[in-house]
Image (cartoon, grey):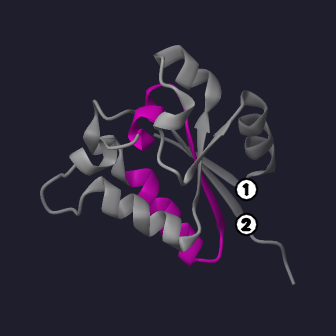
Amino acid sequence: MSEKKKILYIQTSGVDVPERTYAPFILATTAAMMNMEATIYFLIKGVTVVKKGEAEKIKIDGFPSLKEVMDQAVKAGVKLMVCEQSCMLLGIPRGEFAPEAKIVGAATLNDLAINADAILCF
């Protein structure tokens, strides 16, 4: 059996640009449903998207809340990873993130990138 394709989404846009927050979750959920291994890596201001309570505040007309979209992604098997250095840069403590989001270091992003079949940035 062939190995699953791996796709990496890098989210650098934060809650201050809500229209850029949906795409990684929607695309990653779709990838997971296509039997791909999908990961969203939150970097720089992107870490604010998975800060506790923030996704619930984002709701764009015609779409469910970002929290609903995030929950669908997690249920589909999408992995959520948060850059530890970005958290430090923005002064956000480790315990302030959604429980589904794993805090990881810079080496993890490099490993994900060199092993991915495709990378998309938002």
Image coords of residue 62 (percent x, y): 14, 63
Inspect the image, locate mark 2, and give the three-letter code of the amino acid beneath it.
Lys
Residues in magenta, as a range = 23-51
- Residue that sits furthest to the left in the current view: 61
On whether residue 27 falls in the magenta region, the answer is yes
- Placement of 36 over or under 67, stated as above or below: below
- State the residue at coordinates (47%, 48%): 98
Extreme-front residue of the structure: 95
Q: Residue at x 80, y 50 (%)?
A: 115
Camera-nearest residue between 31 and 70:
70
Q: Which residue is mark 2?
A: 5
Q: Position of residue 15 (x, y in %)?
A: 31, 35
Residue 100 is a magenta residue: no
Residue that label 1 marks:
117
> What amino acid is at disc 1?
Asp
Q: Quadrant of residue 1?
A: bottom right
Q: How many marks?
A: 2
* Quadrant in the rendering for residue 45: top left
Report the quarter where the C terminus lies: top left
Position of 55 compared to 63: left or right?
A: right
Furthest-bottom residue in this view: 1
Disc 1 residue crowd, few under 14, some 14–19, many 20+, Cα 10 Å = few
Which x, y percent locates residue 38? 62, 60
Q: Position of residue 25 (x, y in %)?
A: 44, 57
Secondary structure mostly seen in magenta is helix
Please report contact status of discs 2 and 1: CB closer than 8 Å, yes or no.
yes
Separation of disc 2 and disc 1 at Cα? 6 Å
Q: Residue at x 27, y 50 (%)?
A: 56
Secondary structure, mark 1, is loop
Report the side of 60 relative to 122 (left or right).
left
Out of 82 and 30, give the one closest to the viewer: 82
Determine the residue positioned at 53% across, 15% down: 89
